[in-house]
């Protein structure tokens, strides 16, 4: 029965997502102009996904063939399932999000509470699809493949591969459009955000969905399944023959799914007038339910509470990182207000203060992660058995991600609220509607930053746990930094996040240049566009973002897969271990810095727009817009992709561990 409970819970999550979808579809989509604009956004988003998936289908087939030849066909089958399920989660979630946006805008004409309920419901569909497909796929493959988790590492590789392409591609798309729309529309032309006269406005709203809904969903999908896989593979090694202990991570994930459903129901029906407190309310309820369930599971399966305390450590670290992220990125706290104040003296001080906030924000999360790692390692007996301690770290990762359904729901709510504001502006709805959607959007910026912080923290723990499985598979017991080859691996690994960040930032810059030129061209050549008498060519801007994203996402994605295999084959098992360690160390820091600096710049701009420091149109506002423009690719392209990068490289190493252990170190053998 234990083997089938995760399958049942996965199906329950998908049923809940279906019920939410039907409920959203029944809501009023507004007037004809609102339907028209929403149709543009929906068509653009789905067209991008279909083109992206055509590219990725070729990638999936090629990698599956390589896995069949190098590893085995069962791992290849799991790889295909992981990739397809990740695609399905993104597709279903974004399909609903692009329908919930217009209904949220219409609901805002009746009041904030109803608008919040619809926006959160749209995000919850994405969240339930992520956990439902994740746990269902893992449990089903585990049973079909004879209760051997070594094959389902391929599922994690498929999920991670799609996540990286989805995050990078979606991030390039959305930020190319956003930067183009802001710099030409808001700064040069002086027109409001989401003004229908701006040719890039539809592409900007499409980008919110492909980057912050589909991309983010794929990101947390791979984090979620990666953490479970790492715990399963270590448990299989430690508890051979004890099926209930091996299945413990899947049982814990099942508890998390039920807790997420209950937490989502409470959040949807909350009567609190504060959107942030409403969303927090559901998250805290889910967390409490996981604590109760995990204690019961720990005692019934292991006979003590050690596993529970490791899980609790992960939950506390995750919630704490979320709160710290909120402090550094919300305009209710001094850090964002300091950036807004600095904007009075120009763009340079805005950029400097934002960078400082991003760098400061790395300290406490890293201390928390270190504390969680040490506690979960030693509480499980890591001092006596290193792999039991590493198993504790993997349980902390599963614990942190146990309420992923809620985390994704709260995160995906943000772009839906953002789109609702855009539709309200372009449709000419009363200013009171835009005030409600702006308030929801401002909270969405903070929840998105919290979601990114959560994903980054979980990436560190999941990568460590996956690395433990790699070490066990390759019989690697220690890494000697005094060995030059290992040190080379560490340095290459530490460099990769910088290279990856440079490639993705440059991609946004190149795509944004094309967008800026096109928007300027339309302003100059379409008579009556600024007077609102002529319609911009929205489709041209959508095409620019789509083509740039699909073209520019390929190199970063391929690098993340090829480099670990190349280092392992050329320099051996220990050098690859050093590479993973270096990538995790620098990648986590860069990801936190970029995500939080970007979120802080964004909310500093919104703080000024609400009337502080001269309000809209002031010199401070213009400086803050520039800061927000720099922060956009930080927080929505390069930063979030870092955590996928380090997990993808780790799981690539795990999938090809046996091949590298048997055949790696070619250069070393040549020199010796």
Image: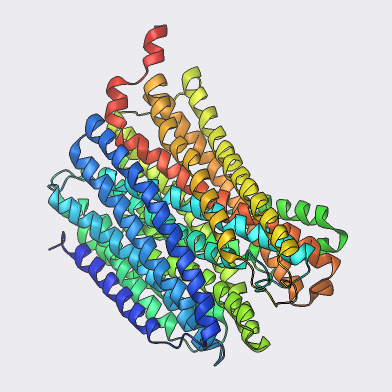
Q: Residue 453 versus residue 285: which sits nearer the camera?
A: 453
Q: Residue 121 versus residue 269: which sits nearer the camera?
A: 121
Residue 101 screen position, x and y as percent: 50, 76
Q: Quadrant of the C terminus?
A: top left
- The residue lying at 55 percent from left, 40 percent from top is 500
Residue 38 screen position, x and y as percent: 50, 75
- The residue lying at 83 percent from left, 65 percent from top is 620
Looking at the image, residue 281 sits to the left or right of residue 607; the answer is left
- Res 282 visible: no
Residue 93 found in image quarter: bottom left
- The residue lying at 42 percent from left, 52 percent from top is 52
Residue 489 screen position, x and y as percent: 48, 26
Placement of 236 over or under 431, stated as above or below: above
Q: Residue 140 versus residue 617: which sits nearer the camera?
A: 617
Residue 272 screen position, x and y as percent: 52, 87
Identify the residue at the far top of this view.
672
Looking at the image, residue 434 sits to the left or right of residue 300; the answer is right
Q: Residue 379 versus residue 330: which sits nearer the camera?
A: 330
- The residue lying at 54 percent from left, 64 percent from top is 208
- Res 216 visible: yes
Identify the residue at the far bottom of this view.
110
Looking at the image, residue 23 sits to the left or right of residue 43; the answer is left
């Amino acid at each position: 029965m234990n083997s089938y409970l995760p399958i049942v819970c996965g199906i329950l999550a998908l049923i809940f997502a279906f019920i939410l979808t039907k409920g959203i579809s029944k809501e009023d989509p507004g007037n004809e102009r609102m339907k028209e604009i929403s149709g543009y956004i929906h068509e653009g988003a789905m067209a991008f996904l279909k083109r992206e998936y055509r590219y990725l289908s070729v990638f999936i087939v090629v990698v599956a063939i390589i896995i069949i030849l190098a590893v085995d066909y069962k791992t290849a089958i799991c790889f295909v399932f992981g990739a397809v399920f990740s695609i399905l989660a993104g597709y279903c979630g974004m399909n609903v999000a692009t329908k919930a946006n217009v209904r949220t805008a219409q609901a805002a004409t009746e009041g904030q509470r109803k608008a919040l309920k619809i926006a959160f419901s749209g995000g919850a569909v994405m969240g339930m699809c992520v956990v439902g497909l994740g746990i269902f796929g893992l449990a089903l493959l585990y049973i079909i493949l004879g209760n051997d988790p070594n094959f389902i590492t391929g599922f994690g590789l498929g999920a991670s591969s799609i996540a990286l392409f989805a995050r990078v591609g979606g991030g390039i798309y959305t930020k190319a459009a956003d930067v183009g729309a802001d710099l030409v529309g808001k700064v040069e032309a002086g027109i409001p955000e989401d003004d229908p006269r701006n040719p890039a406005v539809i592409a900007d709203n499409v980008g919110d969905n492909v980057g912050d809904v589909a991309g983010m969903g794929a990101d947390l999908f791979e984090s979620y399944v990666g953490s479970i896989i790492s715990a399963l593979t270590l448990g299989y090694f430690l508890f051979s023959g004890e099926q209930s202990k091996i299945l413990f991570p899947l049982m814990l994930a099942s508890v998390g799914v039920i807790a997420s459903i209950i937490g989502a129901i409470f959040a949807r029906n909350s009567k609190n007038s504060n959107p942030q407190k409403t969303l927090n309310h559901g998250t805290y309820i889910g967390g409490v339910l996981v604590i109760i369930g995990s204690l019961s599971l720990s005692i019934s399966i292991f006979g003590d509470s050690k596993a529970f305390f490791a899980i609790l450590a992960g939950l506390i670290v995750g919630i704490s990182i979320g709160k710290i992220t909120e402090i550094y990125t919300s305009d209710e706290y001094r850090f964002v207000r300091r950036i807004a104040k600095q904007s009075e003296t120009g763009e340079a001080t805005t950029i400097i203060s934002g960078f400082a906030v991003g760098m400061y924000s790395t300290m406490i999360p890293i201390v928390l992660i270190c504390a969680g790692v040490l506690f979960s390692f030693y509480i499980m007996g890591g001092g006596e058995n290193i792999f039991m301690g590493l198993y504790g770290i993997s349980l902390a990762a599963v614990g942190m991600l146990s309420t992923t359904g809620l985390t994704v729901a709260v995160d995906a709510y943000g772009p839906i609220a953002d789109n609702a504001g855009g539709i309200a502006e372009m449709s000419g709805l009363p200013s009171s509607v835009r005030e409600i959607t702006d308030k929801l959007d401002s909270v969405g910026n903070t929840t998105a930053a919290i979601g990114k912080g959560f994903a980054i923290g979980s990436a560190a723990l999941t990568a460590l746990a996956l690395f433990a499985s790699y070490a066990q598979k390759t019989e690697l017991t220690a890494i000697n930094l005094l060995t030059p080859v290992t040190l080379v691996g560490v340095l290459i690994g530490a460099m990769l996040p910088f290279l990856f960040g440079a490639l993705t930032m440059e991609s946004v810059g190149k795509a944004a240049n094309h967008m800026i030129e096109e928007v300027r061209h339309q302003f100059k050549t379409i008579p009556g566009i600024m007077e609102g008498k002529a319609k911009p060519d929205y489709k041209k801007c959508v095409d620019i973002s789509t083509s740039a994203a699909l073209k520019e996402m390929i190199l970063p994605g391929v690098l993340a897969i090829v480099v670990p295999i190349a280092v392992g084959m050329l320099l051996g098992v220990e050098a690859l271990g050093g590479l993973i360690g270096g990538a995790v160390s620098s990648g986590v820091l860069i990801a936190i810095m970029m995500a939080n600096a970007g979120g802080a710049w964004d909310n500093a701009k919104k703080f000024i727009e609400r009337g502080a420091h001269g309000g809209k149109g002031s010199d401070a506002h213009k400086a803050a817009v520039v800061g927000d423009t720099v922060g956009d690719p930080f927080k929505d392209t390069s930063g979030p992709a870092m955590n996928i990068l380090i997990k993808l490289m780790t799981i690539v190493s795990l999938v090809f561990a046996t091949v590298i252990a048997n055949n790696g170190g070619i250069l070393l053998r040549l020199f010796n």
